[in-house]
Image (cartoon, helix red, strand yellow):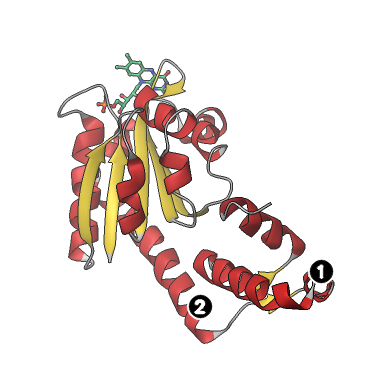
Amino acid sequence: MKAVILYDSKTQGGSTEALIDSIGLKLAEAGFYVEKAKCKATANYRFVREFDLVILGAPVYYFLVSSQLLGSLIHGNLKKNLKRKKIALFLTCGSPESMAAVLYLPQLKIHLISNKILAEKIFAPDDLRKSEVHQEFVDDLLNEYNRKGRSKVRSGAVWSEEANEFIQGLPGFLQGKFLTMAEEYAESMGYREITLEVLEEARDALGGT
Ligand SMILES: Cc1cc2nc3c(=O)[nH]c(=O)nc-3n(C[C@H](O)[C@H](O)[C@H](O)COP(=O)(O)O)c2cc1C
């Protein structure tokens, strides 16, 4: 299992870097091979495809999530390379969690609507100092990571009536290919039901028309 922590911060050796080292250590203790990489909007993010889990996080400065992480999602090729990835998000900031959840987290989530977000956490200044809060985030993330893995093996996704009708309406020679693609996508995302929405999402994520 390979995880990468993509982070940004304007402070070398600051609170965000200390946090990711702590999160990385806890993931390694849980059996992950962990790498960290500092975001640069112009970077080529093709390398994230090699990882099973991608954790994205950054501080907030002047009401905006730090610019190199946001820039990588908006202008760079990070979003494209995160397709079908299991991800987790965190922010470090000085605001209370309730405020940051409304003002700051959506700045990231709006670019990640086709991803399954396993866990998300806002680390306020007090949380940054508490190893047990870091551990809670890692535990939540791993519970979701493992839960989805188990459900994939136990049961294949069920087709909704509408999605099934859609498939039946396709030319016969396309049905098998489309069915496999949709089921693989649903499995990778941990979906238990394949609905029309899931089919649309799969089409967008896999670059179909
Ligand atoms: C210049 C500056 C601007 C900041 N602006 C905000 C802000 O708008 N909202 C907020 O909640 N926190 C703000 N903070 C708090 C930081 O997000 C918080 O201290 C974070 O942990 C800093 O991470 P770092 O040590 O990696 O730089 C700001 C901090 C600094 C230094």
Furthest residue toward bottom: 154
Picture coordinates of residue 176 (x, y %)? Answer: 67, 78
Whether residue 129 is visible to the viewer of this picture, yes or no, is no
Examine the image and state in which quarter residue 95 appears: top left
Examine the image and state in which quarter residue 94 appears: top left
Residue receiving disc 2:
152
Picture coordinates of residue 177 (x, y %)? Answer: 63, 73
As displayed, is residue 126 above or below residue 177?
Answer: above
Residue 166's disc number: 1
> In which of the image's four quarters is ligand 1 placed?
top left
As displayed, is residue 186 above or below residue 123?
Answer: below
Residue at image location 47% in from the left, 44% down from the top: 80
Q: What SS does tag 1 mark?
A: helix
Residue 62 horizontal side relative to residue 204, left or right? left
Picture coordinates of residue 63 (x, y %)? Answer: 46, 19
Furthest residue toward top: 62
Whether residue 80 is visible to the viewer of this picture, yes or no, is yes
Picture coordinates of residue 14 (x, y %)? Answer: 19, 28
Residue 111 horizontal side relative to residue 197, left or right? left
Residue at image location 63% in from the left, 77% down from the top: 157
Residue 61's disc number: none
Which of the pair 101/198 is nearer the observer? Answer: 198
Few, some or many C-alpha atoms within 10 Å of disc 2 (few <14, some 14-19, many ≥20)? some
Residue at image location 48% in from the left, 83% down from the top: 153
Q: Amino acid at mark 2?
A: Lys
As displayed, is residue 110 above or below residue 12?
Answer: below
Residue at image location 73% in from the left, 66% down from the top: 195
Q: What SS does tag 2 mark?
A: helix
User: Which quarter shows the N terminus?
Assistant: bottom left
Label 1 vs 2, first from the N-terminus:
2
Q: Amino acid at mark 1?
A: Phe
Examine the image and state in which quarter residue 201 appears: bottom right
